[in-house]
Image (cartoon, rainbow, N blue to C red):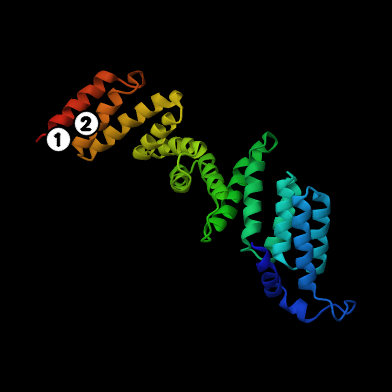
């Protein structure tokens, strides 16, 4: 959210309250302007490392406009950046109780719960926490705004929850904007294998190796063989023969080389007919 949008958002969210100020409020007071000033002050204080003062400023702004979801969401972000997960979650939920569609609140709640799910102390709750986090982050991704941190986290959550086809699709989309990002390539390779998407697995492991991941050569070779089998089953014999050839020039210890040679030769034979 840009600075200049906050007065508009706060005015829209709290129009009734602004039109009917509390009796104790000075007639000339403008609660939206006051809250916006405190919001800007909070961001400046946080940037200068004065986090507690930044939090105090936001809490004061919330006191002025308690029904402004954007202020609660901003507070959630400050807490999240400080690793104060419980307070971040509470602030984000306060924002969502006012505006369930609030993008920043959904974002911080999803990211924080994804991180909390990985803590050993939460092993018993990890599945439910990840499922909830997925719901929040999917709302963020539904907006026409690119958010690579959310996209990468969502791919990891899908993978952890066994939703490998969704994970592969998400990692692949992320890599279109961030080509060669190692964490996403590894995620794509793993998820594509589990989803049986062998073209994507081959592409991912091939790129991992070009980045120095020689340890993944057996995975690349195995993925090539599986892709060759897939092409053969689809009667794409020329492509199958080519992929089997690539596998045979890769790591032969990862598969039965004699069997793959026979399959390659049969594919060549059928491709020539």
Screen quadrant of the C terminus: top left
Residue at x-position 76% and y-position 72%: 32
Name of the residue lying farthest toward the left: 273
User: Does the rendering let one see residue 127?
Assistant: yes
Q: Mark 1: few, some, or many residues within 10 Å (few <14, many ≥20)?
A: some
Q: Position of residue 49 (x, y in %)?
A: 78, 47
Q: Position of residue 89 (x, y in %)?
A: 71, 51
Q: Mark 2: few, some, or many residues within 10 Å (few <14, many ≥20)?
A: many
| Residue 50 vertical placement versus 2 (above, below) | above
Which residue is labeled 1 in the image? Answer: 271
Q: 271 left or right of 246?
A: left
Q: 14 left or right of 183?
A: right
Q: 88 left or right of 182?
A: right
Any mark on residue 221, and which? none
Residue at x-position 77% and y-position 77%: 17
The earlier-in-sequence mark between 1 and 2 is 2
Any mark on residue 241, and which? 2
Element under disc 2: helix
Residue at x-position 52% and y-position 59%: 142
Residue at x-position 16% and y-position 28%: 266
Q: Position of residue 231 (x, y in %)?
A: 25, 37
| Residue 13 vertical placement versus 169 (above, below) | below
Please state which of residues 196 and 107 is positioned toward the viewer in this rendering: 107
Q: Position of residue 269 (x, y in %)?
A: 13, 30
């Amino acid at each position: 959210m840009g600075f200049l949008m906050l007065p508009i958002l706060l005015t829209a969210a709290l129009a009734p309250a602004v039109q009917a100020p509390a009796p104790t409020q000075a007639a000339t007071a403008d609660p939206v302007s006051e809250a916006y000033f405190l919001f800007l002050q909070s961001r400046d204080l946080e940037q200068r490392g004065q986090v507690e003062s930044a939090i105090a400023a936001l809490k004061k702004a919330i006191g002025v406009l308690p029904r402004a979801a954007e202020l609660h969401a901003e507070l959630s972000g400050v807490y999240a950046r400080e690793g104060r997960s419980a307070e971040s979650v509470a602030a984000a939920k306060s924002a969502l109780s006012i505006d369930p569609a609030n993008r920043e609140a959904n974002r911080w709640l999803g990211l924080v719960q994804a991180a909390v799910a990985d803590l050993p102390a939460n092993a018993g709750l990890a599945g439910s926490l990840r499922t909830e986090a997925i719901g929040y982050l999917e709302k963020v991704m539904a907006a026409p705004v690119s958010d690579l941190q959310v996209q990468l986290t969502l791919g990891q959550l899908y993978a952890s929850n066994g939703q490998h086809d969704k994970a592969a699709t998400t990692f692949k989309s992320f890599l279109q904007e961030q080509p060669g990002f190692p964490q996403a390539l590894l995620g794509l390779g793993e998820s594509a294998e589990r989803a049986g998407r062998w073209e994507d697995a081959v592409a991912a492991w091939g790129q991992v190796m070009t980045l120095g991941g020689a340890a993944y050569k057996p995975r690349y070779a195995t993925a090539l063989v599986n892709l060759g089998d897939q092409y053969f089953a689809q009667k794409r014999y020329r492509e199958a023969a080519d992929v089997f050839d690539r596998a045979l020039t890769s790591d032969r210890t990862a598969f039965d080389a004699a069997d793959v040679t026979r399959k390659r030769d049969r594919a060549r034979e059928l491709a020539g007919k």
